[in-house]
Amino acid sequence: MHNNPLPKYHSSVFFVSDVEKSKKFYKDILGQKIEMDFGRCIGFSGGFFGKILAKGMARGHKDFYKNAVKAINPKNDDEYLEIGFGSGIFINRYMSHVSRIAGIDHSEDMVKLASDINRKLVESGKAEFRQGYASSLPWADNEFTVVAAIEVFFFLNETEKTLREIFRVLKPGGKLIIEMGFNKDDGVDHKRHIKKMNLKLYSGEEMKKLLKKAGFNDIVIDYYKAFWIPIKGYVVPKGMVVKGIKK
Amino acid sequence: MKKEMLDILCCPTCKGDLELEIKKEDEGEIIEGSFTCKKCNCTYSIDEGIPNLLPK
C-alpha cells in the first residue's frame, strides 16, 4: 500500500528557468495564487508557513541542485533515474546529455510539467516521466547507473522499501545520490516543518545505517552551506548529500 | 501582499530591515509599491501584489 500524504505545496514548482511558464502553470493549470517573485522562482499560496518555506526553497533549490550535480557527476553514458523529479528542471538543466533519463513522481501534474519542460528529450525517446511511488519502481533490475533523490527523501514514508527498490534497479557499480537541505545535522529547529509537512528527518549516521541495510557500500555523507531566505532571524542551514554505491 | 509581511521580511541581499513604500493598496493588500533596505539602500519592487525579492 502506498501511503504518501504529501503536502499540497510539495507537488510544485519552486525553481524553473522560465518564470513566466511557471506562473502560467500555477495560475491557469493549478489555479493557485502567486504570492512572491524571487526572479527565477516564485512562491505560492499553501498556508502561511508553506508560503515561507516554498519561497525559501525557491531560492534554495539552486544550491541543492549545484551540490546534487556535483555528487552525481553525470557522464554521457549514464542511465539516470530521478525519484520525485517535480518540475523536471534539474534534468533539463544538468542531465540532458546523459544517454537515458527516467523519472518517477507521485504527482500527475508534475509528470505533465516535467514532460513539457523536457519535451525534446521525451519526443526523442531519451526521457520518460512516470507517475508512481518510489517504494515500487516500475523498472527491471540493473537498469540505471545513477539514481538521485533531490529534496525528496524526507517526504518518503517507506524509506527502507524505497532504498531496496533503488538498489534493485541500479546496475552493479551504480550510485545513489540523496540530497537533503533539511536534516538532523543542519542546526535548525525543524519542529514546525516536521508537523506541518510530515517530514522525516535523518542524521548522517542514520542515513549510513539505512543505506547499509539496503545493501549499499562506500557510503559517504557530505555537508554544504544551504540557502537562506529573506526572513528575519533565519538561520542558514547545513545541507546534506548522501552517496552510496551498489557493488 | 499583506502589510504584515514587512514584520518578517528582511533584505535578501544584506539581511537589513526593509522600508515599505505603498503606491497602490486594495483592501489591506499592497498592489504596487516597493521595499527599500535601510542598510544597503537596495530597492525591491512590488508589482501586481507580488514582491520581487531577488538578491541584488
Image (cartoon, coloured by chain):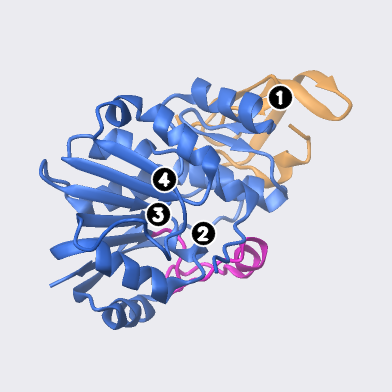
Of callouts 3 and 4, the N-terminal one: 4
Per the model, the C-alpha gap separating discs 3 and 2 is 10 Å
Q: Nearer the viewer, residue A106 or A54?
A: A106
* Residue A127 percent coordinates (x, y): 29, 37
Q: Nearer the viewer, mark 3 or mark 2?
A: 3
Q: Residue at x 78, y 35 (%)?
A: B3
Q: Is residue A192 magenta?
A: yes
State the SS at label 4. Answer: strand
Query: Where, by quadrant of the figure, is residue A234 drawn?
Result: bottom right
Of all chains in the rendering, the one displayed in orange is: B
Q: Is residue A14 visible?
A: no
Please report contact status of discs 1 and 2: CB closer than 8 Å, yes or no: no
- Residue at image location 51% in from the left, 59% down from the top: A235
Q: CA distance from mark 3 to mark 4?
A: 29 Å
Q: CA distance from mark 2 to mark 4?
A: 36 Å
Disc marking residue A130: 4
Q: Is residue A156 within the magenta segment?
A: no
Q: Are marks 1 and 4 in contact (CB under 8 Å)?
A: no
Which chain letter matches label 2?
A
Q: Crowding near pointer 2: few (<14 within 10 Å), some, many (20+)?
A: some
- Residue at the spot 78% in from the left edge and 41% down from the top edge: B4
Q: Are marks 3 and 2 on the same chain?
A: yes
Q: Which span is picked out in magenta?
A: A180-202
What residue sits right under mark 1 in the picture? Answer: B49
Q: Pointer 3: residues within 10 angstroms few (<14), some, or many (20+)?
A: many
Tell me the crowding category of disc 4: few under 14, some 14 to 19, or many 20 or more residues within 10 angstroms, Cα based.
many
Q: Classify the position of the N terminus of chain A by image quarter.
A: bottom right
Which residue type does callout 1 highlight? Gly
Instruction: Indicate the colour of chain A.
Output: blue
Residue bearing mark 3: A226
Instruction: Check residue A235 in the rendering and tell me which mark sits there, or answer none.
Output: 2
Measure the C-alpha gap from mark 1 to mark 2: 27 Å
